[in-house]
């Protein structure tokens, strides 16, 4: 059979074919990169450690319910895992994972984080193979009337607000080994042991005199941490990075005495005192019996839902402002997102009155009060250089063909930084 076209014998026709083929292909609509793959941040910067905090809102009303939900393949947990896998942190603090003796945190790790959760998004299994979790104060009975309403059986009367022990717990996940024997926890630390603590007060309506809200007996026993404060050392190529994890109480849900506002302030102040060294932190005593703060030559990252916005909301902002301005803390890089700006404009109301930049918001809250806030923080020590960072809060356009519910997996959004640790002193 005679060939349809002999290119070797007909060079002019050959050139014409090539020309037409090239131009035809260039005129065809090029398929844009799948927008699904563009909703996550860029891969971790080479030479950096990506550290993140995420209030995952995996709390349930009953003890053991989260464990049952996770075993059944919880949809919320799947979306949380998709977000984590998209951001791909090397270290993650997850707030609001019910403790359940550590079983829930382990299930979240093994059944969700370490398994790809989205074929559409082409997510990869997380590298967070190490984990630390421990008991917290929420739901643990104090046996005292802490809210001064005449009974001692309310959720408010527990060392930390909660319906059962370990509700709203937390867990640290890491790609790198955790030095568990060197972990310091501060669950039991008594609030009254903090010098110049912000002890809640009331003003007597009749005399105008101030009086303490809690009796001396109650005040002497109150624990500072509503959950706990942790110092979790992680080993990274010969360098120790201390993950300082916490989740202070919201500064609301109380009365004129502002006991939760005072507690939130001092829980955050504890963080500043702990990293500032002996000048501020000599009073500190951990659950293991060791006294004193973190060494000033130690590298650290403060992580957590601190429930305090530097410029907006109901908290006593001085504590978070003091923490951000500490010479030991590198707070110059402020993570941001486009989705938070969009949400602020669409939701309006309280957001329109805010002083802070909506791009830095991390939590999506009631539109009437308080509106969206910046309350989740990743704060490295001054030794560390911040190279990149952000808040994973996609816009509606980015999510419309994927999973619109992804943005609502939690009322908080994951915050991440890529940091260079610097040389070990």
Image (cartoon, helix red, strand yellow):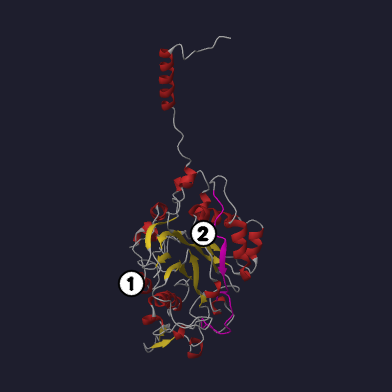
- 72 lies left or right of 147: right
Q: Check disc 1: other Cα within 10 Å, few if <14, some if 14-19, many if 20+.
A: few
Question: Residue 378: which numbered mark, if any?
Answer: none
Q: Which of 149 and 409 is in front in this view?
A: 409
Residue extent of the magenta highlight? 123-149
Q: Quadrant of residue 29?
A: top left
Question: Residue 327: which numbered mark, if any?
Answer: 1
Q: Which quarter of the rendered picture does the C terminus lie within?
A: bottom left
Location of residue 68 with respect to 207 vertically, above or below: above
Location of residue 10 with respect to 116 vertically, above or below: above
- Residue 35: image location, x then y, percent: 47, 42
Q: Which quarter of the rendered picture does the N terminus lie within?
A: top right
Q: Nearer the viewer, residue 79 or 347?
A: 79
Any magenta on residue 288? Answer: no
- Residue 146: image location, x then y, percent: 52, 82
Q: Quick one: SS at disc 1? A: loop
């Amino acid at each position: 059979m005679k060939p349809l076209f002999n290119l070797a014998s007909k060079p002019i026709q050959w050139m014409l074919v090539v020309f037409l083929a090239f131009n035809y292909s260039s005129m065809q609509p090029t398929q844009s990169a799948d927008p699904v793959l563009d909703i996550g941040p860029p891969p971790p910067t080479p030479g950096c450690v990506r550290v993140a905090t995420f209030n995952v809102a995996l709390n349930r009303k009953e003890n053991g319910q989260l464990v049952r939900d996770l075993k059944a393949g919880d949809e919320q947990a799947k979306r949380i895992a998709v977000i984590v896998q998209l951001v791909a942190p090397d270290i993650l603090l997850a707030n609001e994972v019910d403790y359940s003796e550590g079983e829930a945190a382990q299930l979240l790790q093994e059944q969700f984080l370490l398994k790809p959760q989205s074929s559409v998004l082409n997510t990869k299994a997380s590298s967070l193979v190490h984990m630390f979790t421990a008991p917290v104060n929420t739901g643990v009975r104090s046996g005292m009337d802490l809210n001064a309403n005449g009974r001692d059986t309310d959720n408010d009367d527990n060392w930390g607000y909660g319906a059962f022990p370990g509700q709203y717990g937390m867990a640290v996940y890491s790609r790198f080994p955790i030095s568990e024997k060197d972990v310091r926890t501060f669950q039991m630390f008594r609030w009254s042991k903090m010098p110049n603590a912000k002890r809640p007060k009331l003003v007597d309506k009749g005399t105008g005199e101030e009086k303490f809200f809690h009796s001396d007996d109650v005040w002497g026993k109150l624990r500072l941490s509503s959950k706990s404060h942790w110092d979790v050392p992680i080993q990274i190529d010969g360098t120790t990075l201390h993950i300082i994890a916490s989740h202070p109480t919201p500064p609301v849900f109380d009365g004129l005495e502002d006991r939760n506002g005072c507690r939130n302030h001092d829980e955050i102040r504890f963080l500043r005192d702990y990293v500032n060294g002996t000048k501020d932190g000599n009073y500190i005593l951990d659950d293991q019996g060791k006294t004193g703060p973190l060494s000033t030559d130690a590298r650290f990252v403060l992580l957590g839902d601190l429930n305090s916005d530097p410029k907006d909301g109901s908290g006593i902002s001085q504590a978070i402002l003091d923490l951000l301005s500490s010479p030991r803390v590198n707070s110059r890089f402020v993570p941001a997102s486009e989705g938070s700006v969009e949400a602020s404009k669409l939701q309006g109301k309280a957001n329109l009155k805010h002083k802070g930049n909506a791009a830095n918001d991390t939590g999506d809250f009631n539109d009437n009060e308080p509106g969206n806030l910046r309350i989740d923080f990743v704060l490295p020590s001054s030794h560390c250089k911040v190279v990149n960072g952000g808040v994973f809060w996609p816009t509606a356009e980015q999510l419309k063909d994927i999973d619109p519910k992804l943005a609502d997996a939690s009322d908080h959004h994951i915050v991440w930084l890529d940091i260079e640790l610097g040389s070990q002193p």
